[in-house]
Image (cartoon, rainbow, N blue to C red):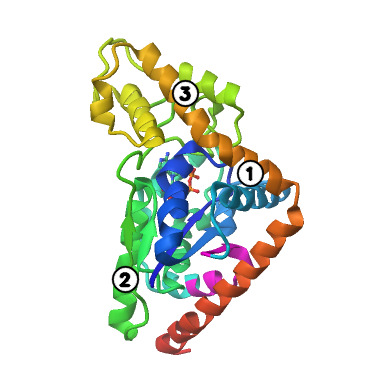
């Protein structure tokens, strides 16, 4: 069976972007057709200033939400990254494989680093090396496919380069993985700033739909989404990104095609209303199941313990092989 790995960072509450870009496909497709691992990648939450108690709380909430969205621990492995030492162990070997030049070129580092500097904060070294840890997350499991939103393309490319370079230098150890993206809504945009992606750690909550927002809040955020001053509903991501984003959301939530849907609307108001209704219905079961699971923390703990043990069992032999190959 094909090996799949993917993850979410507990740097904030999970968003509709995380769901449509990644989690929904893990649930509906990947866990059924492969030997898949899904991780709450908590080490990645330490690359910026953070509150330790909050990271712990958000990790548990993210794991609970993954189960609420429909990941089934009988079909796949769900675990927290820091519970499996192999990620950090392998990351160091990959730091000895990557160059500082290729890491400094990463778009997310350049953007987040610039934001931190502008805010007068120092930039943690881990913000630079984070894609190497991500490469370790993926390579430690012999992963073939990485289902992600399209903001992660560059990081998966780096992972491929590091796998190939390591194999060339030290002999074949790593499978070279490839990224896969959903057909629609691979990049959900912020509702208030439709030229930036909807990201859980952005400041402006009004443009972000969180999976745990109640129906009223989801409706309000979508009804207030920024569109543009035109009137025609057309699917044009460049000229009219806010409208295109709504069409993507509606298409992703109803199984339609965004370009075909554009023809069915004469006003932004009715498009927003239908999009809001569709997103509310899409998220309703996730929110309900989350409430049930949150009431039984012992169950989530058990799933995560079992998941970590399974993940460790898969990663350890491969990481040991990498240590031997590099001469240790
Ligand atoms: P975030 O940017 O919200 O912190 P993560 O880094 O935790 O997201 O990413 C988790 C998954 O969600 C990744 O596969 C990522 O590509 C996907 N993802 C994140 N934001 C979006 C978005 N706005 N649209 C589509 N996919 C997204």
Q: Give the class, few, some or many, for how many residues have Cα within 10 Å of label 2's Cα (few <14, many ≥20).
A: many
Marks 1 and 2 sit apart, C-alpha to C-alpha, by: 36 Å
The residue nearer to you, when weighing 261 against 222, is 261
Residue 291 location in percent, x, y? 69, 41
- Is residue 67 located in the magenta-colored stretch of the structure? no
Looking at the image, can residue 254 be seen?
yes
Secondary structure at badge 2 equals: loop
The residue nearer to you, when weighing 124 against 277, is 277
Mark 1 or mark 3: name the one nearer the start of the chain: 3
The residue nearer to you, when weighing 222 against 195, is 222
Residue located at (57% from left, 34% from top): 284
- Is residue 78 located in the magenta-colored stretch of the structure? yes
The residue to which callout 1 is attached is 289
Residue 151 location in percent, x, y? 37, 46
- What number is the disc on residue 276? 3
Q: Give the class, few, some or many, for how many residues have Cα within 10 Å of label 1's Cα (few <14, many ≥20).
A: some
Start and end of the magenta stretch?
75-90
The residue to which callout 2 is attached is 176
Residue located at (45% from left, 28% from top): 278
């Amino acid at each position: 069976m094909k090996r799949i790995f993917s993850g979410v960072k507990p740097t904030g509450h999970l968003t509709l972007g995380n769901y449509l870009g990644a989690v929904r496909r893990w649930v509906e497709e990947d866990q059924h057709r492969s030997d898949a691992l899904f991780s709450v990648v908590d080490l990645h939450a330490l690359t910026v200033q953070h509150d330790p108690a909050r990271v712990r709380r958000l990790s548990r909430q993210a794991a609970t939400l993954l189960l609420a969205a429909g990941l089934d621990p009988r079909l796949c492995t769900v675990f927290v990254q820091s519970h499996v030492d192999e990620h950090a162990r392998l990351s160091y070997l990959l730091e000895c494989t990557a160059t500082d030049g290729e890491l400094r070129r990463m778009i997310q580092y350049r953007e987040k680093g610039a934001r931190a500097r502008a805010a007068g904060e120092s930039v943690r070294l881990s913000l630079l090396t984070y894609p190497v840890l991500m490469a370790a997350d993926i390579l430690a499991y012999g992963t073939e496919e990485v289902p992600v939103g399209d903001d992660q393309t560059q990081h998966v490319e780096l992972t491929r380069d590091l796998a190939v370079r390591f194999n060339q230098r030290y002999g074949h150890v790593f499978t070279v993985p490839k990224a896969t993206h959903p057909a629609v809504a691979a990049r959900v945009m912020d509702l208030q700033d439709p030229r930036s992606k909807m990201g859980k750690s952005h400041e402006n909550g009004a443009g972000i739909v969180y999976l745990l927002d109640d129906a009223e809040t989801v409706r309000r955020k979508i009804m207030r989404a920024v569109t543009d001053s035109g009137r025609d509903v057309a699917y044009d991501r460049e000229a009219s990104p806010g409208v295109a984003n709504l069409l993507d959301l509606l298409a992703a939530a109803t199984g339609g095609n965004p370009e075909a849907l554009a023809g069915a609307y004469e006003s932004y108001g009715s498009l927003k209303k239908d999009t809001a209704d569709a997103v509310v219905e899409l998220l309703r079961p996730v929110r309900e199941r989350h409430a049930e699971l949150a009431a039984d923390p012992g169950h989530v703990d058990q799933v995560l313990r079992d998941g970590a043990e399974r993940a460790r069992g898969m990663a350890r032999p491969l990481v040991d092989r990498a240590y031997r190959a590099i001469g240790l």
